[in-house]
Image: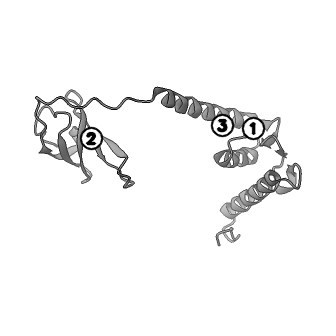
């Protein structure tokens, strides 16, 4: 499908490619693996932020056109890549794993699918949510007992967290009902 311009791309060169989906990708070469024909390009950010970059991994076997826009001489030594903050990356990985474990254990704690749906909806917004038997605990202040309706929200009625969770549960059930019965108006309608 493709004709590769050269067997090797120098790091720092500017390369433009057109994929088999007619997508144009242009950027600076960060790495190239000739065995797998994988090219890694650093491109301007799709969000428009000049301080950030997109990194695209391009399979040259699926590219219809490759052009080297600016070749960097092989005599120049490329700048070393910026060092990674490994502590920050490890913290992000640990947090992501912990969140997934928490959600998996939460789903296995409750057999009621309605309770699971409400728990997942709350967990998307609030991190401090857990199961206490068959009840959902939020902020360790508010409890939602089966059948997980608005009337089953228990806590100090004058606290902000109680009022917020009560409104959250009310909105959740209204949206659930709207999904099953399209004639029911939702908040946005």
Q: Quadrant of the N terminus?
A: top left
Q: How far from the left and from the top, in percent, is residue 94?
A: 57, 29
Count neighbours of disc 3 (C-alpha within 10 A) and say few if under 14, some if 14 to 19, many if 20 or more. Answer: some
Does residue 151 appear left or right of residue 120 in this picture? Answer: right
Q: What residue does disc 1 label?
A: 130
How many marks the image carries: the answer is 3
CA–CA distance in space, label 2 to label 3: 35 Å
Q: Residues within 10 Å of mark 2 (few under 14, many from 20)?
A: many
Q: List x then y, in percent, for residue 173.
A: 74, 58
Tag shown at residue 93:
none
Q: Which residue is mark 3?
A: 103
The structure residue drawn at horizontal position 17% and vertical position 39%, both measured from the top left corner, is: 13
For label 1, count other residues whose C-alpha is less than 10 Å away and answer few (under 14), some (14-19) or many (20+). many
Q: Which residue is mark 2?
A: 41
Label 2: element kind: strand
Circle 1 — which element? strand
* Relative to 133, residue 19 above or below: below
């Amino acid at each position: 499908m493709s004709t590769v311009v050269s067997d090797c791309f120098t790091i720092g060169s500017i390369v433009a490619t057109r994929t088999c989906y007619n997508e144009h990708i242009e950027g600076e070469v960060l790495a190239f693996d000739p065995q797998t024909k994988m090219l890694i390009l650093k491109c301007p950010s799709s969000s428009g932020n000049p301080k950030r970059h997109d990194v695209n991994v391009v399979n040259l076997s699926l590219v219809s056109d490759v052009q080297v826009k600016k070749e960097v001489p092989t005599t120049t030594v490329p700048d070393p890549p910026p060092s990674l903050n490994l502590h920050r990356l490890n913290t992000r990985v640990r947090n992501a794993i912990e969140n997934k474990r928490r959600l998996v254990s939460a789903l296995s704690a409750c057999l009621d699918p309605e309770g699971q749906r409400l728990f997942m909806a709350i967990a998307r917004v609030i991190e401090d949510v857990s199961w206490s038997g068959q009840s959902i605990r939020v902020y360790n202040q508010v409890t939602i007992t089966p059948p997980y309706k608005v009337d089953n929200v228990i806590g100090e009625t004058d606290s902000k967290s109680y009022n917020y969770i009560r409104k959250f549960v009310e909105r959740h059930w209204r949206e659930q009902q709207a999904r099953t019965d399209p004639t029911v108006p939702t908040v946005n309608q």
